[in-house]
Amino acid sequence: LEIIPTEKFSMPTELIEYMNKKQISFISWVPTAYSIVAQLRSFAFIKPAYLKKAFFVGEVMPTKTLNYWRKFLPDVQYVNLYGQSELSGVSCYYIVSKDFANDEKLPFGKTFSNCEIFIVEGDTVITEPNRVGEMYVVSDALAMEYYHDREKTEASFVMKDFRSDGNPKRTLKSGDLAYYNDDGLMVFASRSDSQIKHLGHRIELGEIETIAGAIDGVQKCCCLYNEKRKQITLFCELSADIEISDIEIRSMLKKKLSSYMVPGKVVILETIPLNANGKINRTY
């Protein structure tokens, strides 16, 4: 087991040299780490020589980033994982087995054998495709409680009778929104606190991020909603060698999104801030 020094991720060539020196054959990283390698087009200079499996977990993997890795390392097995901090481990997995367009969402697939996930809207358990609901997780590996936070524990860990058979189960009300695709695989939509109502329409900000992230030159992006101003703002970090303006990005989004989903403002940042776990810091 190798715990890769954090500073290596800011220098992808040294990172890959380190991986080759240690003969690393399996990695499990947050998607942002994969994106750094893709952003700097590192595989044009050096490739991981021993890598066989690549897992990613903790946030949504941009399909554009995955496609870069698959282009240069087609024989590696890529696995998308989904889990919660309240669960000791992950609950779902999807082994990437086909090509996806840059603006397609990657499924997180199906549950492991020790878990059940129910997608719920109100009191209805959703089974049909492309209908969004909140994910409830049932597992023997659920945490007992939040440390010294009874109010949050009672709000998140609830008893629910999903099958109406008089056998309620202890479940985690995850706050994540998801849906089944046409293949019966679960797909992340957004966090429930990222679902907004704007101009009379219900919008998942994650949908906007998926489309924006597929634009050539947009390396990372984050979409936020200002409730007071009733404004959607898209923050973008661009690839180092591509010049594109906020006006051009917004123009491209108009071709892909319904008019009520187009951000009122696009802000280009030198870097999008990350939190201590390497994920996008949406409260920065």
Image (cartoon, grey):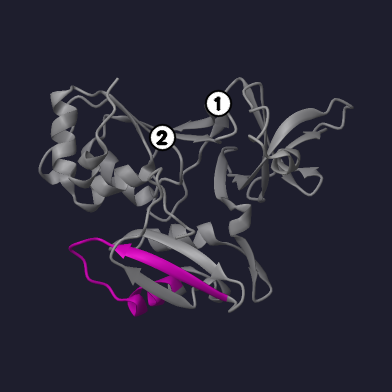
Q: Quadrant of residue 186?
A: top right
Q: Residue furthest right?
A: 166
Query: What percent of the width, then of the height, locates residue 202?
Result: 66, 65
Residue at the far left in the pictured view: 45
Question: Which residue lies under the disc numbered 1?
Answer: 88
Q: Residues within 10 Å of mark 1 (few under 14, many from 20)?
A: few
Q: Is residue 216 visible?
A: no
Question: Which marked residue is nearer to the observer: mark 1 or mark 2?
Answer: 1
Query: What amino acid type is highlighted by mark number 1?
Result: Ser
* Numbered circle sitting on residue 96: 2
Who comes first in sequence, dot 1 or dot 2? Answer: 1
Q: Which residues are magenta?
A: 231-253
User: Dividing the image into 4 quarters, which one contains the N terminus?
Assistant: top left
Query: Measured from the top left, where is residue 150 in percent x and y?
Result: 73, 39
Name of the residue lying farthest toward the front: 148
The reply to whether the C-beta atoms of the residues labelled 1 and 2 are less than 8 Å apart is no
Give me the residue at 23% from left, 35% from top. Answer: 73
Helix, strand, or loop for circle 1?
A: loop
- Residue at position x 45%, y 46% in the image: 60
- Mark identifier at residue 222: none
Answer above or below: position of 253 versus 166.
below
- Classify residue 133 as left or right of residue 225: right
Few, some or many C-alpha atoms within 10 Å of disc 2 (few <14, some 14-19, many ≥20)?
some
Give amino acid for label 2: Val
Q: Position of residue 100 (x, y in %)?
A: 40, 46
